[in-house]
Image: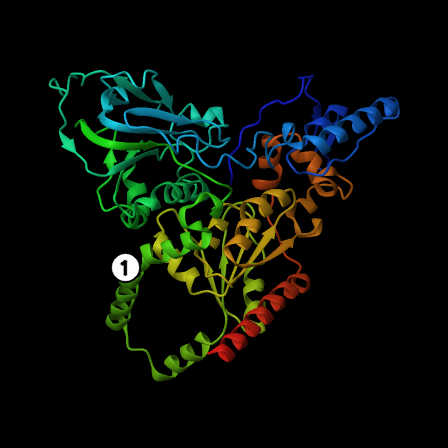
C-alpha cells in the first residue's frame, strides 16, 4: 500500500461521528464536503435545515477549486499529497567551488550540494566543508529522503549537518583531522529508511530517484547510505552496481574520514514511478530506466536460467512429447497473474486462470514473497505479454514488463484514484497497454456485508474522505474481489486480440 499522513487544511471543527453497525456506514456532517481527498469527486450531502447555507459554501468552494485547486486537495488516502514540481533548472546549478547550496523549492524533496574540500564525520552525522575564506558561512541541515511533506516519516530519517569550517576539525576517531580515504569521484548521499520494505516505496522513493540523481556520473560516483540494511543491498545490489563502480559506504558504521570534492545530499524525484525527460540530461525517460533495469538484471537472469537448466537435467529427462508441448505453449501469449494472499485477493483466481487458458493464453500464477528474488520476478514478467493484478504495492512490478505489453489492473471499490495515479498513468508512460478493470459492488466481498444503499458500496468517495484509517480498514484491509467471469472475459479477449495483432504486425515488419 502507499503510505500517507493526513494534515488538516481547513479550520478544525468537531470531527463528524461515524455510526457503524453491521450492514451500515453512515456519515453525519456537512463538514464532510470540505474534506475530500485530492481529485476525488465532490458530492453534496445536504440537510434540509442548512440547504441555503450549504449552497453558498458550495459555490465559494467551487470558485476556489477552479482557480486554486491545489491549495486544498491532496492525494487519495490523505490530504497531504505533493503537487508536481516545476523547479527546473535547479537553483544550485551554477554554484561556485567552496560553497554549500540547498535547493528546498521542491515539494517532495530537498537536495543539497557541497563543492570543495569535503570531509565526513559519521559520529556527528556531519559533512564538513573546509572553507578558509568563509565563502560559505551557514550550516545546513537535511534529511535525505524523498517524502519531505510527510513529517511523521521524515522524523525517523537521520538529520545530517553540512558545516563550513575554516580548518579540518580533530575528532575522537580522527584526532589529526586528515583524510583516511580520498575519493576522486563525487558522492551521492541518501537514506534507505522510511517506508523501505514496501516495493512501491523502494522504487518510487528510492531506486528511481537514485537513478535520476546519479546516472549522469556514468558509474563514477560513490553512494553514502544512511540507515544501511544488508537485506536492501542484497535485494538491489545489481541495480546499485550498475549505477556505481564503487562499494557503497555504510555511513553510520564507517568511522573513517572520507574526503570528496563534490557531494550531493538527497535524491531528486519527479512524479509517481516515472521520469520527466525535461529534467534529465539527454531527455531520458522511464523507458530508459526500464532499459537500465534490463542491463542491471541481465547477469543474474542468465545465472537463474543456468541454475534451472542444471536442476532439470539432474532431476529427470524431459520426454520429447513434453518438449513438443512446451514448444507449442511457448507460442501462446504468456499471461501472468500476480496473486495476493491477504486482503484484496481474487477469490475465483483459479477460474480466471482457466478462462484465460481457454482463450489461448499460457498462464502462470506468481505468488511473490518477501524472500523472492527480484531478478526472478523480472525474468518472469520481462518474458510475459500480459500482467494481471489487484491494486496494491505489487503492481509496481509493471516496471518489469516490456513496452507494448498489457497491464490489467483490477481496481477494488474505493481505490479508483490511487490505482490510476500510482500505477495506471505511469504504466502508460512506460509504453504499456493499460486496461482498467473497475469492479462493480457485487464483485466485492463488501457486497455481502453492507446494504446496497450504504455509502461503502454506493459512494466510496465519501468514505475515503473520512481519512486514511477508514480507507485502510474498509477498502484496503477489508475486501476481496470475486470477478464476474463474463465481464472480465471481455478484458482478457481485448488483451489477447491486441497481442495477436501486435505479433502479426511484428512479423510483417520482419
* Residue 57 screen position, x and y as percent: 79, 24
Q: Is residue 251 left or right of residue 88?
A: left
* Residue 318 screen position, x and y as percent: 32, 78
Q: Which of the 4 image quarters holds residue 453?
A: top right
* Residue 91 screen position, x and y as percent: 43, 30
Q: Residue at x 26, y 71 (%)?
A: 315
Q: How many marks?
A: 1
* Residue 222 screen position, x and y as percent: 25, 39
Q: Nearer the viewer, residue 18 or 89?
A: 89
Q: Residue at x 68, y 38 (%)?
A: 40
In what element is the residue under mark 1?
helix
- Model colouring: rainbow
- Residue 276: in sight, yes or no? no
Q: Residue at x 26, y 19 (%)?
A: 124
Q: Nearer the viewer, residue 52 or 466?
A: 52
Residue named by callout 1: 299
Above or below, 356 against 294 in this view is: below
Above or below, 13 against 350 in this view is: above
- Residue 311: in sight, yes or no? yes
Label 1: few (<14), some (14–19) or many (≥20) C-alpha neighbours in 10 Å:
few
Amino acid at each position: 500500500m502507499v503510505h500517507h499522513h493526513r494534515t488538516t487544511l481547513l479550520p478544525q471543527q468537531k470531527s463528524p461521528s461515524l455510526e457503524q453497525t453491521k450492514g451500515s456506514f453512515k456519515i453525519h456532517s456537512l463538514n464532510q464536503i470540505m474534506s475530500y481527498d485530492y481529485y476525488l469527486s465532490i458530492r453534496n450531502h445536504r440537510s434540509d435545515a442548512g440547504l441555503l447555507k450549504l449552497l453558498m459554501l458550495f459555490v465559494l468552494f467551487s470558485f476556489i477549486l477552479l482557480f486554486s485547486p491545489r491549495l486544498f486537495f491532496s492525494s487519495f488516502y490523505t490530504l497531504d499529497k505533493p503537487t508536481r514540481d516545476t523547479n527546473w533548472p535547479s537553483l544550485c546549478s551554477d554554484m561556485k567551488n567552496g560553497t554549500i547550496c540547498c535547493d528546498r523549492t521542491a515539494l517532495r524533496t530537498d537536495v543539497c550540494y557541497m563543492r570543495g574540500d569535503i570531509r565526513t564525520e559519521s559520529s556527528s552525522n556531519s559533512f564538513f566543508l573546509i572553507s578558509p575564506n568563509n565563502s560559505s558561512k551557514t550550516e545546513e541541515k537535511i534529511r535525505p529522503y524523498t517524502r519531505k511533506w510527510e513529517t511523521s516519516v521524515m522524523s525517523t530519517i537521520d538529520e545530517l549537518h553540512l558545516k563550513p569550517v575554516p580548518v579540518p576539525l580533530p575528532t575522537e576517531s580522527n584526532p589529526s583531522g586528515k583524510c583516511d580515504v580520498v575519493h576522486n569521484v563525487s558522492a551521492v548521499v541518501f537514506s534507505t529508511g522510511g517506508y523501505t520494505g514496501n516495493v512501491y516505496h523502494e522504487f518510487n522513493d528510492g531506486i528511481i530517484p537514485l537513478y535520476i540523481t546519479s546516472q549522469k556520473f556514468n558509474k563514477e560516483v560513490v553512494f553514502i547510505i544512511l540507515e544501511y540494511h544488508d537485506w536492501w543491498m542484497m535485494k538491489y545490489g545489481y541495480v546499485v552496481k550498475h549505477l556505481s563502480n564503487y562499494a557503497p559506504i555504510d555511513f553510520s558504521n564507517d568511522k573513517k574520514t572520507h574526503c570528496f570534492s563534490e557531494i550531493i545530499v538527497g535524491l531528486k524525484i519527479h512524479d509517481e514511478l516515472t521520469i520527466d525527460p525535461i529534467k534529465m540530461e539527454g531527455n531520458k525517460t522511464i523507458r530508459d530506466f526500464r532499459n537500465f533495469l534490463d542491463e542491471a538484471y541481465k547477469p543474474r537472469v542468465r545465472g537463474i536460467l543456468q541454475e534451472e537448466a542444471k536442476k532439470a537435467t539432474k532431476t529427470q529427462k524431459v520426454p520429447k512429447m513434453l518438449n513438443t508441448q512446451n514448444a507449442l505453449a511457448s507460442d501462446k501469449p504468456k499471461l501472468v497473474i500476480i496473486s495476493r494472499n491477504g486482503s484484496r485477493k481474487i477469490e475465483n483466481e483459479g477460474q480466471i486462470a482457466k478462462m484465460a487458458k481457454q482463450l489461448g493464453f499460457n498462464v502462470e500464477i506468481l505468488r511473490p514473497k518477501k524472500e523472492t528474488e527480484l531478478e526472478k520476478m523480472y525474468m518472469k514478467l520481462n518474458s510475459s505479454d500480459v500482467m494481471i493484478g489487484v491494486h496494491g504495492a505489487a503492481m509496481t512490478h509493471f516496471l518489469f514488463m516490456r513496452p507494448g505489453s498489457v497491464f490489467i489492473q483490477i481496481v477494488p471499490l474505493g481505490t479508483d484514484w490511487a490505482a490510476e495515479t500510482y500505477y495506471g498513468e505511469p504504466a502508460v508512460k512506460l509504453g504499456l497497454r493499460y486496461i482498467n478493470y473497475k469492479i462493480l459492488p457485487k464483485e466485492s466481498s463488501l457486497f455481502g456485508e453492507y446494504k446496497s444503499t450504504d455509502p461503502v458500496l454506493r459512494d466510496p468517495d465519501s468514505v475515503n474522505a473520512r481519512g486514511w484509517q477508514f480507507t485502510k480498514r474498509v477498502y484496503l484491509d477489508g475486501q476481496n474481489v470475486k470477478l464476474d467471469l463474463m465481464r472480465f472475459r471481455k478484458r482478457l479477449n481485448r488483451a489477447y486480440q491486441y497481442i495477436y495483432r501486435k505479433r502479426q504486425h511484428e512479423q510483417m515488419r520482419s
